[in-house]
Amino acid sequence: MKRIAFIIATVVLIGMSFTSCSKPVTPASLTADCIEYIQDGDYAAYVNTFDATDEEKAELQEMFEQKGKALIEKNKGIASYEIIEEKISEDGMSAVVKAKITYGNGEVDDSNKFNFVKVNDEWKQAPLKK
């Protein structure tokens, strides 16, 4: 019985050490993830950052795979990016992150805005306006 208690305590301590090492997800860090997903062509991971139904995510993924991929290819990929500003609302339930993206062809776009909402205590991209 002591051995089982020891094993359980060890598993709990290991689990706690892993959670204490992980960085909290912020709108800025999620924006960086989103840009990297786009850069890598991982549109499935990208659409999973949205607050959307599975059906909406499937539509978004199809759209990004067609239009987003073409834009990235036209601009010769993403060379680098920079998070310019993160503004979280006073109530902490929404945020806007501005990012500058430098494409492989040298073009710089500093007008990128990512809108976020907090859903079940987790940041998600706000649904796209139709």
Image: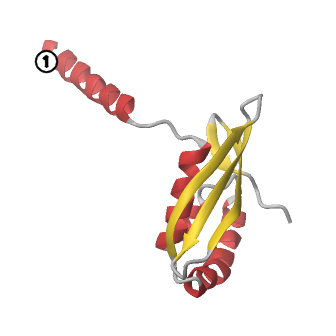
Residue 42 vs residue 111, the one in the foreground: 111
As drawn, which residue projects farthest toward the right? 130
- State the count of labels: 1
Q: In which quadrant of the rendered view does residue 20 lie?
A: top left
The front one of 98 and 56 is 98
Q: Position of residue 50 (x, y in %)?
A: 66, 55
Q: Callout 1: 10 Å neighbours few (<14), some, many (20+)?
A: few
In the image: residue 59, left or right of residue 129: left
Q: Amino acid at mark 1?
A: Arg
Q: In percent of the image, x 70 and y 66: which residue is there? A: 55
User: Of 91 and 109, which appears nearest the observer?
Assistant: 109
Residue 112 higher or lower than 68, as above or below: above
Q: Position of residue 111 (x, y in %)?
A: 72, 63
Whether residue 120 can be seen here: yes
Q: Residue visible at 66% across and 69% down?
A: 109
In percent of the image, x 64 and y 83: which residue is there?
66
* Residue, disc 1: 3
Tell me where residue 5 appears, x and y as whole percent. 21, 16
Q: Residue furthest left?
A: 3
- Looking at the picture, does residue 108 appear above or below residue 17? below
Residue 106, image x, y percentages: 55, 78
Direction from residue 42 to residue 112 in the image, left or right? right
Query: Does the rendering let one see residue 42?
Result: no
- In the picture shown, does residue 56 fall above or below 26? below
The C terminus appears in which quarter of the rendering?
bottom right
Q: Is residue 111 left or right of residue 69?
A: right
Residue beneath the point at 62% across and 85% down: 70
